[in-house]
Image: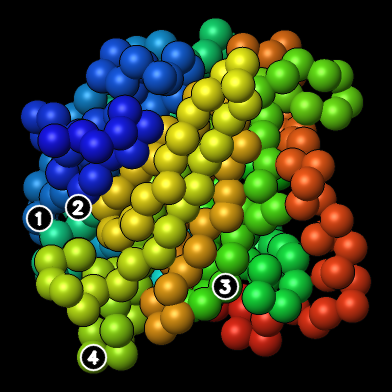
């Protein structure tokens, strides 16, 4: 049972072939953005139409081929979200797509971050080596951002998507910030999806935890609003959990000591321009000034192409 309409624990949003299916049709807080995850055994296929959405095919684990309207792309993928920056494929709206798992063993897991859009751009392969890896913040607020689908590094019509890795014990999405007002040059309207994976303990070599035992990894995530636009989320998050943010201040995301945190951010909105402009909570914006006196966490980058 959903404890909060903005927080979906792992399995709560499974639907048909997808272990996660979050769209404007299935979750009322959303109007523009989607995220689906499909799991495929070696050689298995998943065929679908993109409809009015543009998407990425992003391996969370495993490898695949992607055929988009007859054009084939080979995706090397990765073992898990913590061990490598992955390559990906952008597929446009009004396309017929087939994903075939080429994972050598086990189940491949493929994310489909998406957004409703108007313009049809060409399908494209983005190699891992072309993904800008950004180290953001300092001290225990250092995190790694894999900008595979950010507004300033990849051309799309409406969709913005990035990966963030927060080392064990660190804070990210901090200071808390928002992007829910149209203020040209200062803030853009973007709803957002956070999808989490948490590393397992040392006995599992850092592979993502499935949250099946009491010793599995965890973290925390916070969202809060204003009296005029209330929203309230303070949840323990584990692998497979999702937080939906139609508006409001969001952050921090806190990785428990001993467990790295990964999250996939999917953003889109009604603005005339595809841009990521944020506003820090004024009560905590001063924290950024302290980063000038601190070194970045030497554990980062945790992964690379």
Q: Do the residues labelled 4 and 2 touch (CB within 8 Å)?
A: no
Which circle's residue, 3 or 1, is located before the other in the chain?
Answer: 1
Residue 118 or 21: which is nearer the viewer? 21
Q: Considering only vertical position in the picture, is 296 above or below 276?
A: below
> Residue at image x 61%, y 16%?
228
Residue 232: image x %, image y %?
Answer: 46, 35
Chain-order first, disc 3 or disc 4: 3
Residue 222, which numbered label? Answer: none
Q: Mark 1 points at which residue?
A: 41
Report the quarter where the C terminus lies.
bottom right
Determine contact: label 2, label 3, CB under 8 Å. Answer: no
Q: Is residue 211 toward the left or the right of residue 111 in the image?
A: left
Is label 2 in a helix, a strand or a loop? strand
Look at mark 4 in the image and give the residue it sits on.
203
Q: Residue 222: image x %, image y %?
A: 50, 48
Q: Residue 201: in sight, yes or no? A: yes
Residue 46 position by quadrant: top left
Residue depicted at 9% across the width and 55% down the height: 41
Mark sitting earlier along the chain (4/1): 1
Q: Can you tell which of label 3 and label 4 is closer to the viewer?
A: 3
- The residue pinned by badge 3 equals 170
Mark in front: 3 vs 1: 3
Tag nearer the camera, 2 or 3: 3
Q: Which residue is drawn at 43% across and 40% down?
A: 233
Q: Which of marks 2 and 1 is nearer the N terminus?
A: 1
Pick whichever of labels 4 and 2 is earlier in the sequence.
2
Distance (Cα) linking label 2 and label 1: 7 Å
Q: Does residue 79 appear anywhere in the picture?
A: no
Percent position of residue 125, x then y: 50, 44
Say whether disc 2 or disc 3 marks the residue closer to the N-terminus.
2
The answer to whether mark 3 and mark 1 are in CB contact below 8 A is no
> Is disc 4 surrounded by few (<14), some (14 to 19) or many (20+) residues within 10 Å?
few
């Amino acid at each position: 049972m959903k404890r909060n309409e903005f927080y979906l624990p792992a399995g709560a949003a499974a639907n048909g072939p997808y272990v996660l299916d979050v769209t404007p049709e299935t979750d009322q807080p959303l109007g523009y953005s989607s995220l689906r995850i499909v799991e495929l055994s070696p050689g298995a296929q998943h065929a679908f139409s993109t409809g009015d959405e543009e998407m990425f095919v992003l391996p969370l684990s495993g490898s695949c081929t992607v055929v988009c309207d007859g054009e084939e792309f080979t995706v090397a993928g990765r073992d898990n979200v913590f061990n490598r920056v992955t390559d990906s494929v952008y597929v446009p709206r009004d396309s017929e797509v087939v994903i075939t798992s080429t994972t050598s063993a086990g189940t491949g897991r493929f994310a489909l971050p998406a957004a409703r859009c108007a313009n049809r751009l060409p399908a494209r392969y983005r190699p891992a080596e072309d993904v800008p890896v950004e180290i953001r913040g300092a001290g225990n607020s250092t995190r790694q951002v894999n900008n595979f689908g950010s507004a300033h590094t990849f051309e799309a019509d409406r969709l913005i998507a990035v990966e963030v890795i927060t080392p064990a014990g660190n804070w990210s999405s901090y200071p808390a910030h928002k992007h829910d007002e149209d203020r040209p040059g200062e803030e853009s309207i973007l709803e957002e999806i956070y999808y989490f994976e948490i590393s397992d303990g040392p006995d599992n070599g850092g592979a993502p935890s499935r949250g099946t035992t009491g010793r599995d990894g965890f973290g925390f995530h916070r969202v809060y609003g204003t009296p005029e636009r209330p929203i309230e989320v303070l949840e323990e998050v584990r692998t497979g959990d999702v937080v939906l943010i139609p508006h409001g201040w969001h952050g921090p995301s806190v990785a428990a000591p001993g467990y790295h945190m990964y999250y996939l951010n999917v953003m889109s909105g009604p603005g005339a321009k595809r841009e990521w402009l944020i506003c820090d909570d004024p009560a905590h914006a001063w924290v950024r000034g302290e980063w000038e006196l601190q070194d970045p966490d030497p554990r980062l980058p945790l992964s690379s192409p």
